Each structure stands twice: as structure tokens, then as C-alpha cells.
Image: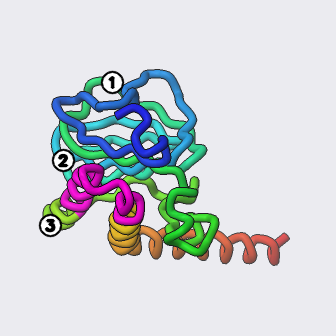
């Protein structure tokens, strides 16, 4: 797995609590990629920024580039993860900042998405396609992987919309309360 596609993208399967790369650290680590984890079995405790999450089966965890995180060791069992540099997708997305298109990469966004079983199957199948793609011809590998990752991100965006609307309503309410407070002072 080392040096996978010039370290621009690193997909892997989590089996029996073991990752194929060294994410299993107890120390706080700064993420140099955008990372997406799908937990399909077991549990996973993660500290992400100032928030603590306990993820279990059918949960999707988003770790933005530059975020500080820490996993509790040996609690996860099965699933998938994908690390990728934002630059890897520049040919696919016109924006130089993925956070403009995909709000779940914002640092203050909600980074745990609870999935329904059918959504877990769809996301899991996209991860499986990404894992199988390195077996294809080298000439088209990068383009095909970019499109699969793009589809994965669009599907996650669709699943994230209810959380984003809730976050927007909460932010609007905070702004409204702040304005009312300013009028009182």
C-alpha cells in the first residue's frame, strides 16, 4: 500500500480492527489529507478537533485536511477508509477548495453521519469500486478513480444535506439572537 498512486490517494479496507496503513495511533495527529471512514462493524472512538465521537456500524466519519484527530486503539472492527489530497480532484472539480462544494470538509461541520442500511451498502460499494480500480490499466486509472471519488463525495453530500440544513438553522438563530442582543445594549 505504501506509495499508492504517488500518495495522492490511499484507499484501504479495515478488517478485524487492523488498517493497512498506520492510522492506529494514540497520539494526536494532524491530518494531511481529506479522510473518509465508513464503519461497517464494531465501534470507533475518535477525538476530532474539540469534539468527541463514538462511531458504530453504519457511521461515516469525515476528517478534513488539517484537522487534528486521535483514535482510541482497537475499538473498530470492519469498514473502509479513503485518504486523498484535495489537489487530486482538481481536474474534476473547478473549485480549488473542496469545502466550497462539500461543506462536510469544513472544520466546524458535523463530521459524523449516521447512515441507513441501504446508504451504507451504496457507500460501501463505492469504496469497493475504488479499491478494485488499481487493478485497471495505468493510463486510465487516475481518471476513473477521480470519478469514483467524485461520485462518493456527491453521495455523501446528498446524505449530509439534512445535517447542513440543521447547522444553517442553528447559525441563523445564533445570528438573530446576536442582533437582538446588540439592540438591547
Q: Quadrant of residue 118?
A: bottom left
Measuring from the top left, give residue 62's x and y in whole percent. Answer: 42, 52
Measuring from the top left, give residue 161's x and y in whole percent. Answer: 40, 74
Task: Judge whether 146 appears above or below 64 on screen.
Answer: below
Front one among 157 and 5: 5
Residue pointed to by mark 2 = 40
Tell me the SS state at disc 1: loop
Residue pointed to by mark 3 = 118
Residue pointed to by mark 1 = 73
Picture disc at residue 12: none
Instruction: Decide which of tag 3 and tag 2 comes sooner along the chain.
Output: 2
Name the magenta segment's main secondary structure.
Answer: helix
Q: Quadrant of residue 42?
A: top left
Q: Is residue 36 magenta?
A: no
Q: Which residues are magenta?
A: 123-145
Residue at the spot x=62%, y=64% of the render? 97
Tell me the SS state at disc 2: strand
Q: Is residue 130 magenta?
A: yes
Measuring from the top left, give residue 29's x and y in whole percent. Answer: 53, 30
Residue at the spot x=81%, y=72% of the render? 182
Q: Quadrant of the N terminus?
A: top left
Task: Indicate left or right for 150 with 74 as reference.
Answer: right
Instruction: Decide which of tag 1 and tag 2 comes sooner along the chain.
Output: 2
Amino acid at each position: 500500500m505504501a506509495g499508492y498512486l504517488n500518495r495522492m490517494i490511499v484507499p484501504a479496507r479495515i478488517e478485524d480492527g487492523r488498517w493497512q496503513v498506520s492510522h492506529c495511533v494514540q497520539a494526536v495527529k494532524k491530518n494531511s489529507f481529506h479522510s473518509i471512514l465508513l464503519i461497517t462493524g464494531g465501534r470507533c472512538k475518535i477525538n476530532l478537533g474539540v469534539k468527541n465521537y463514538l462511531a458504530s456500524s453504519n457511521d461515516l466519519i469525515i476528517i478534513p485536511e488539517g484537522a487534528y484527530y486521535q483514535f482510541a486503539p482497537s475499538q473498530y472492527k470492519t469498514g473502509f477508509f479513503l485518504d486523498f489530497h484535495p489537489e487530486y480532484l482538481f481536474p474534476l472539480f473547478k473549485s480549488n477548495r473542496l469545502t466550497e462544494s462539500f461543506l462536510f470538509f469544513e472544520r466546524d461541520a458535523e463530521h459524523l453521519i449516521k447512515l441507513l442500511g441501504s446508504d451504507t451498502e451504496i457507500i460501501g460499494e463505492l469504496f469497493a469500486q475504488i479499491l478494485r480500480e488499481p487493478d485497471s490499466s495505468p493510463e486510465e486509472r487516475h481518471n476513473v478513480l477521480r470519478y469514483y471519488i467524485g461520485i462518493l463525495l456527491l453521495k455523501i453530500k446528498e446524505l449530509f444535506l439534512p445535517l447542513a440544513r440543521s447547522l444553517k438553522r442553528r447559525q441563523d438563530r445564533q445570528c438573530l439572537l446576536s442582533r437582538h442582543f446588540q439592540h438591547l445594549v
